[in-house]
Amino acid sequence: MTDERYLRVPEVADHLRVDPETVRRWLRAGKLRGVLLSQQGGYRVAESELRRFLAERTGGLASERNRVAV
């Protein structure tokens, strides 16, 4: 079993330097995969999914500034 860390929408938004509502739109559109816990609990995004999303958006460039700290 992996010790995957899950991030809340505001944490993802901070990493990507976007508004949290932008992250929610990406989640609803399926561009970014996450789990909706509940309306009150909100979404959670796995760090591995965030890395995949970044790699896809940057064309596979893995620069240090785009890496998620584990």
Image (cartoon, helix red, strand yellow):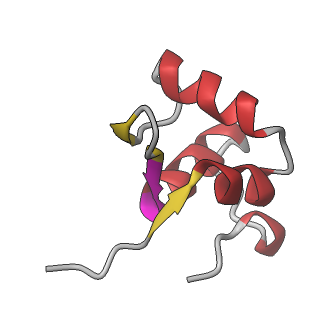
Q: Residue at x 74, y 39 (%)?
A: 20
> Which portion, as a residue range, is magenta?
44-48
Q: Is residue 58 left or right of residue 35?
A: right
**Residue 45 located within the stretch drawn in magenta:** yes
Position of 22 compared to 33: left or right? right
Q: Pick the quarter of the image with the N terminus.
A: bottom left
Q: Is residue 66 above or below residue 3?
A: above
Residue 42 lies within the magenta run: no
Farthest left residue in view: 1
Task: Name the residue rendered at 41%, 41% in the picture.
Answer: 34
**Picture quadrant where residue 19 is located:** top right
Residue 25 placed where, x, y %? 63, 22
Q: Which one is nearer the viewer's eye here, 59 or 10?
A: 10
- Tell me the quarter of the image containing the C terminus: bottom right
Look at 57% across and 44% down and name the residue there.
53
The majority secondary structure of the magenta stretch comes to: strand
- At which x and y percent is residue 31? 53, 26
Task: Using the image, determine if residue 15 lies above or below residue 20.
Answer: below
Q: Where does residue 54 sit, x and y in percent of width and height? A: 64, 49
Residue 11: image quadrant is: bottom right
Q: Which of 31 and 13 is in front in this view?
A: 13
Toward the top, the furthest residue is: 29
Residue 40: x and y in percent read 46, 39
Quarter location, residue 59: top right
Q: Residue at x 68, y 38 (%)?
A: 57
8 relative to 59 in the view: left or right: left
